[in-house]
Amino acid sequence: MRTPLQKGEKILLVTYSSWVSLIIPVFIVLIGFILSYFIGFINHYGWTAALAGLLYFIIKYYSWKAYIWVVTNYRVIDENGLLQHYAKESPLDKINNVSYDQGVWGRIFNYGHVEIQTAAQVGATDYYNVHHPKRLKDTITQAQADLSINKNQAQASQLASAINIHSSPTNVAAELEKLFELKQKGILSEEEYNKAKNKLLNS
């Protein structure tokens, strides 16, 4: 993956498009070697057919390796491009729904289409020919659940820190600011905010 990770970000899954897309390049390599064998009886340049087929396969293989989908604990990254680089990100907290579907061949060879609907106005993001699409969908769903739990724990920690006052006069202003931020975010109600503020000012 060429997209740099953020601080505290961890990779949960890296997946590729289906290996089925490499069937034709492999077939072309075989044709190239067969042609080189028969052309070799006529002249000494039969090896060029095998070389052309092999180069075609190498290009297709590394293009396949460069086309990846990465799930981290913060986002989903769609990345591709062999010589050039293209990357699209979908933050986990902006994803509203993840679904996948597989046709008959997709169920046989375990590939399919994954659709991610985000809060952005551009609509859904579609991933086609994804190897093991259910695993990608399940990983995104689990990462969203874990992110939500971590955010709730962080907010609970902030709330506990703000309400359980152990402040010296030098950091009362900082605690008041923290309380106000919690109120602005809707974590504290007006009543809870005033109660905690009075407790802080009278401590």
Image (spheres, rainbow, N blue to C red):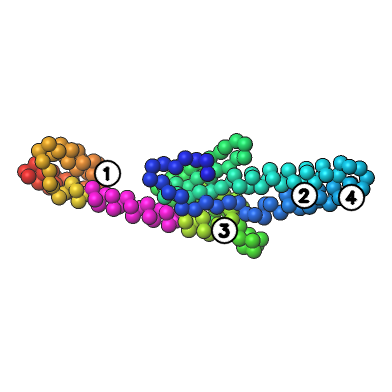
Q: CA distance from mark 3 to mark 1?
A: 39 Å
Residue at 78% x, 44% y is 51
Q: Which label sits in the foreground, 1 or 2?
A: 2
Q: Which label sits in the foreground, 4 or 2?
A: 4
According to the picture, the residue beneath numbered tag 1 turns out to be 185
Please give the range of residues in magenta: 140-158
Contact (Cβ within 8 Å) of mark 3 with mark 4:
no
According to the picture, the residue beneath numbered tag 4 turns out to be 38
Which residue occupies the foreground of this view, 119 or 203?
203
For mark 4, give the secondary structure.
helix
Residue kind at label 2, given as amino acid type: Ile
Q: CA distance from mark 4 to mark 1?
A: 75 Å
Q: Earlier in the sequence, mark 3 or mark 1?
A: 3
For mark 1, give the secondary structure.
loop
Q: CA distance from mark 3 to mark 4?
A: 40 Å
Q: Earlier in the sequence, mark 2 or mark 3?
A: 2
Q: Which label sits in the foreground, 4 or 1?
A: 4
Mark 2: few/some/many CA within 10 Å (<14, 14-19, 20+) = some
According to the picture, the residue beneath numbered tag 3 turns out to be 132
Residue kind at label 4, given as amino acid type: Phe
For mark 2, give the secondary structure.
helix
According to the picture, the residue beneath numbered tag 2 turns out to be 28
Q: CA distance from mark 2 to mark 3?
A: 26 Å
Q: Position of residue 156 (x, y in %)?
A: 25, 52
Residue kind at label 3, given as amino acid type: His
Q: Which label sits in the foreground, 3 or 4?
A: 4
Q: Which label sits in the foreground, 3 or 1?
A: 3
Residue kind at label 1, given as amino acid type: Lys
Q: Position of residue 198 (x, y in %)?
A: 10, 44
For mark 3, give the secondary structure.
loop
- Residue most toward the left? 202
Residue at 64% x, 63% y is 108
